[in-house]
Image (cartoon, grey):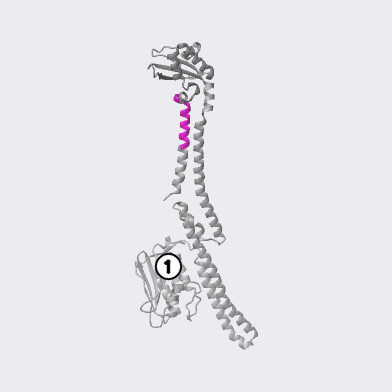
Amino acid sequence: MRSLFWRIFASFWLAAALVAGLSMLLGRALNQDAWILSQHPALDGLAETWTQRYEQQGAEAAQAFLEQRRKAFRVHVQVLGDNGQPLVRGTFPRRAAALEARQAHDRRLPWRRLSAEYSSPLSGASYLFIYRIPHPELLAWHRGSLLWPLSALGIALVVLTLTSLLLTLSITRPLNRLRGAVHDLGQTAYQQDSLARLARRHDELGILARDFNRMGARLQGLIGSQRQLLRDVSHELRSPLARLRIALALAERAPAQEREKLWPRLALECDRLEALIGEILALARLDADPGGARPIDLGALLRKLQEDARLSAPQQQIDVQVPSEARLRGWPDMLERALDNLLRNALRFNPAGQPIELRVTPQAGELCISVRDHGPGVAAQHLAQLGEPFFRAPGQREPGHGLGLAIARRAAERHGGRLLLENRPDGGFSASLLLPLDADAASH
């Protein structure tokens, strides 16, 4: 993975190492004797020319050459032979030589002393050249000789600038795309392909873009489902309200005796409307924060549901089987409402004389809580739509608003599980909640 962290880390280290290296190289180059001996114009070719004149024209010609160089460049030169004695008078004053001898270890002398040995290619003799350059002259030459080091430093700064620019653009451009995607998401105009190119990257920004795409798709789905739910709620509320309005209009025009017959109809419509609003609120509450998960006593919860079902449908038999080792963490009220809806659906369609089977079965990493009836089931083409708010299979005559399975499915999702609906091969219908055993770690 081409990690953005390592790119930034390496870029800063490269910049620091390059600047430090060039600074050290520049400082050493400007202060080394070899640099001055090889680059100073006063010393360029001096040893070769002096040796040629000394060996071919004599000491006077050699001394005259040193005088010319002193006048042109203000550089004093002495030349010593193999015995350590001067071969010519040189250009260094005797009083200055005495001062240098007395202050041999004093670095505050007004000149810099350099020495270099040269061997004649003609005679093979060795000569020791001693140069003394005044500090003002040396500083003036330094200022003029900084072109190459400063050029190298300038090139390094250009390279560092380009590297920093590319690194900055590699960070700011993706961030600008993410900012635009956040703005589109806030305006509910988010398109997943807006970050498609960024999501193909193999660094942290690519991972962030892929996570953002998933989040955006999830939020867009939730927004779409909420809008659809609002439309469905408006449609479902319109029918009982219309019936209430018609019943009220009839009650206002009917005589007293007929009016008494309309009151039960009004009460029934009010009860239906209240039940519908209660189911809508129950579905909406599932999206609220339920707080921390806690252990659920499945045995007690299912027995309570069994007793409630006996009161509402005493003719039905409910067979409950809960293994003692079944354990679950979650939200008891949410789970009870989901199972209550599944059990009520089973009671509507289960024929008398056949038991409703309520089972708890541990599986690999999850717990299956199933409710099975022996009714007619649902057509296979409608199974995928079951659990959508306000959807009811065609031909269903039993009362209801199509929210019971939606509540059960949403409760399963809040526990990190899923709702499985299927027709049994041997007849009947089965609704199962498949919940992870670590439901407390599920997404809220």
- In-front residue for pair 48/396: 48
Report the side of 401 relative to 373 (left or right): right
Secondary structure type for disc 1? strand
- In-front residue for pair 155/409: 155
Q: Label 1 sits on what residue type?
A: Arg
**Picture layout, residue 93 above or below residue 381:** above
Most extreme residue toward the front, as rendered?
56
Residue 381 image point, x, y percent: 44, 76
Residue 385 visible in rendering = yes
Does the stretch in magenta take in 259?
no
- In-front residue for pair 41/419: 41
Check disc 1 and report the residue beneath it.
418
Q: Which residues are magenta?
A: 18-34
Residue 4 image point, x, y percent: 45, 48
**Picture layout, residue 312 above or below residue 221:** below
- Residue at 47% x, 57% y: name it: 211
Residue 88 visible in rendering = no
Q: Residue 118 lies in what quarter of the image?
A: top left
